[in-house]
Structure formats: C-alpha cells, structure tokens
Amino acid sequence: MGHAASWASRTSPHLLRSGYRVSLKLTHVHPDLKGWEERNETVTSRFVRASGITIWFDGLTFRKREDGSLQGCIAIRHKDGPVKEDSFTYQQVKAG
C-alpha cells in the first residue's frame, strides 16, 4: 500500500477550476502523515475524464467501490526510472 494522498492532513485535496479546466490539488504523505513536499507545497493533477463511478486525473484515478470506499491508483514517476503504480483505499470514518 505504501504512500497515499491525504484527505485529512495539513492540506486536504481541492478541486480547482481555471476557465474550462479542472484540476485536483493535494499534498502527498507517508503512512505516518509526514508530507513528501515542503510544508506549503502541493501537487496538481489535471482532470482527464469521468465516467460512471470512475474519475481520472493525470497520473491518478479514483473509483467508488460497492462498499462505499474509494479505491485510488497513482502512477509514480521516479527520476531516471520506471513508472510505478500504487493503489490505496479511502474508507469513511465516523466522527465521534
């Protein structure tokens, strides 16, 4: 499972609109919620398309699962190396 984008750390994901373009802005975190990027830096992924229960951004895909969780898949490009795909699951947590 490894790394994932954080929904509840320092910077929550934001959908941004600029003219007719939509992007997802987020901060990457390690499992211990320490950020990959510098404190105020974020990563922006361009919206590609949506269909049914799946939405695609540049290098990032989300699919809603039957149990209500959100399955994510990210393509991680390493310097001078191959692209590695990693998947993760977001599950709703009840506050309380």
Image (spheres, helix red, strand yellow):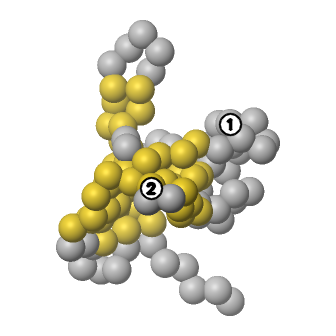
Residue 55, position in %: x, y?
A: 31, 62
Of callouts 2 and 1, the N-terminal one? 2
Name which residue type carries label 2.
Arg
**In the drawing, does residue 73 fall left or right of residue 3?**
left
Marking on residue 21: 2
**In the drawing, does residue 18 fall left or right of residue 50?**
right
Outermost residue, top side: 80
Outermost residue, bottom side: 96
Name which residue type carries label 1.
Glu
Q: Which quarter of the rendering shows the C terminus?
A: bottom right
Residue 94, position in %: x, y?
A: 57, 86
Tell me where residue 85 sits by quadrant. top left
Secondary structure under the numbered disc 1 in the rendered image: loop
Q: Which residue is mark 1?
A: 37
Q: CA distance from mark 2 to mark 1?
A: 24 Å
Q: Nearer the viewer, residue 59 or 34?
A: 59
Q: Nearer the viewer, residue 68 or 61?
A: 61
Report the number of discs: 2
Q: Is residue 29 visible?
A: no
Residue depicted at x 47% and y 46%: 45
Q: Nearer the viewer, residue 52 or 75?
A: 52
Outermost residue, right side: 39
Residue 20, position in %: x, y?
A: 44, 59
Residue 8, position in %: x, y?
A: 65, 65
For disc 1, the neighbor class at 10 Å (few under 14, some 14 to 19, many from 20) is few
Secondary structure under the numbered disc 2 in the rendered image: strand
Q: Are the residues at dot 2 and dot 1 in contact (C-beta closer than 8 Å)?
A: no
